[in-house]
């Protein structure tokens, strides 16, 4: 009997720690036992030559009119430095998004623990699908950053400090939790849609130039941003639209049950939650700024103390303002002088924002 027990070959090398984890990861990625049938499976072909990260690739230069790319200081830098800072900026925003998704999942887990009645079947299932998608986003973001290969510092320290409280907030103050979800997801969604639209407009213009001039433009020169970043953003925007819809639906459902006192309090802190979400997801940490080598005055003007910065802040909070109007959270009866002042101090009241359709 003992002879039947297989023994490790004496000449066989024991797999390293990382090799064993790679094997387990491949199994998890290659074979997915899904609880529901899938009509379609979309995936990113990370090894596609188009997605290769190359040295001195101009597609990492932040576009003019976007983020740091809108500032004269960045525009006057040598090309190599622009590329370096562009890669670091993108990677750190991606890392921050990853950390926000991790915090969000902790809150979702607590909420689903409370959905035990059969009437919550669809809500439980949708929440769990959301958590599953957020986990995939985390893997996607981590893979992108691994391939970019620069150091990341992620979210500000204050956000990491409050992350363990997300679960408690989801249990005891679900309205605040859903508002926080939207405060973090919508600014990132806005920025990704803006950058994707700029990329698509640039690509269309290059294709038009090809047709009109009868020339062939290399594919790389048709890209405003790196195609792997564009692909990741497209995947994320598509799935986050559902997650934003879930949070909005639950605000609509549960707000009517709030007392007058609760509504007054929520109306006053709502703009602060919105501004905190913008700061957490898009405002670089001090460590990141030092790492990128961005002067403090430049950072101050981009985020958000200049005409451009203030307009950016109003644009980022447009949906939050619209939602507040819809839910009655800007009603003077609920706000009072204190609430009005909070909106003003947060810089998101939209008093001088551009007109929207």
Image (spheres, grey):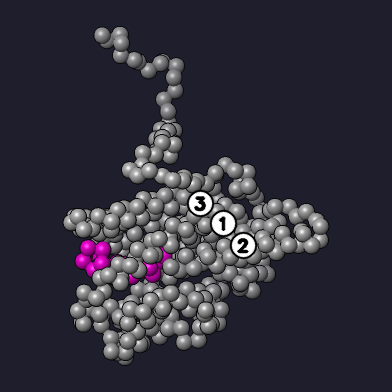
Q: Are marks 2 and 1 in contact (CB under 8 Å)?
A: yes
Q: Are marks 1 and 3 in contact (CB under 8 Å)?
A: no
Would residue 241 be found to the left or right of residue 58 on screen? left
**C-alpha span from label 2 to label 1:** 8 Å
Q: Which mark is residue 145?
A: 3
Q: Are marks 2 and 3 in contact (CB under 8 Å)?
A: no
> What residue span does the magenta drawing correspond to?
169-185
Q: Which mark is residue 199?
A: 2
Identify the residue shown where x is 28% and y is 86%. 334
Seen in the picture, residue 7 relative to 92 is either above or below; the reply is above
Give residue 312's position: percent from left, percent from top: 52, 76
**Quadrant placement of the N terminus:** top left
Q: Quadrant of residue 253?
A: bottom left
Q: Nearer the viewer, mark 1 or mark 3?
A: 1
Give residue 60's position: percent from left, percent from top: 62, 58
Give residue 113's position: percent from left, percent from top: 21, 55
Identify the residue shown where x is 46% and y is 45%. 41
In terms of secondary structure, where does tag 2 sit? Answer: helix
> Disc 1 designates what residue?
230
Would residue 23 be found to the left or right of residue 306 on screen? left
Q: Quadrant of residue 26?
A: top left
User: Mark 2 vs mark 3: which is more N-terminal?
Assistant: 3
């Amino acid at each position: 009997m003992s002879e039947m027990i297989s023994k490790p070959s004496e000449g066989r090398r024991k797999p390293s720690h990382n090799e064993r984890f790679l094997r387990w990861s491949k199994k998890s990625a290659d074979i997915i036992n899904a609880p529901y049938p899938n009509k379609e499976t979309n995936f990113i072909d990370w090894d596609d030559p188009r997605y290769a990260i190359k040295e001195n690739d101009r597609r990492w230069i932040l576009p003019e009119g976007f983020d740091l790319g809108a500032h004269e200081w960045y525009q006057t830098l040598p090309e190599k430095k622009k590329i370096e800072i562009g890669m670091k900026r993108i990677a750190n925003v991606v890392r921050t998004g990853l950390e926000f998704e991790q915090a969000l999942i902790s809150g979702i887990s607590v909420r689903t623990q409370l959905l035990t009645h059969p009437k919550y079947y669809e809500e439980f299932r949708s929440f769990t699908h959301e958590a599953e998608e957020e986990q995939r986003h985390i893997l996607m973001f981590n893979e992108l950053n691994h391939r970019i290969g620069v150091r990341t510092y992620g979210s500000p320290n204050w956000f990491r400090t409050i992350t363990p409280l997300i679960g408690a907030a989801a249990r005891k103050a679900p309205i605040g939790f859903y508002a926080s979800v939207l405060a973090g997801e919508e600014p990132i969604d806005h920025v990704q849609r803006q950058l994707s639209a700029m990329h698509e407009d640039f690509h269309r213009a290059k294709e038009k130039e090809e047709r009109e001039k009868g020339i062939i433009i290399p594919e790389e020169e048709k890209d405003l941003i790196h195609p792997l970043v564009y692909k990741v953003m497209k995947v994320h925007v598509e799935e986050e639209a559902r997650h934003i819809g879930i949070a909005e639906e639950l605000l609509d459902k549960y707000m009517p049950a709030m007392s007058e006192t609760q509504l007054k309090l929520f109306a006053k802190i709502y703009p602060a939650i919105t501004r905190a979400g913008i700061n957490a997801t898009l405002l670089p940490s001090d460590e990141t700024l030092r790492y990128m080598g961005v002067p403090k005055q430049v950072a101050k003007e981009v985020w958000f103390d200049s005409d451009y910065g203030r307009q950016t802040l109003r644009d980022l909070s447009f949906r939050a303002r619209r939602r507040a109007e819809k839910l009655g959270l800007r009603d003077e009866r609920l706000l009072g002088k204190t609430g009005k002042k909070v909106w003003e101090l947060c810089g998101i009241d939209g008093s001088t924002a551009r007109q929207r359709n």
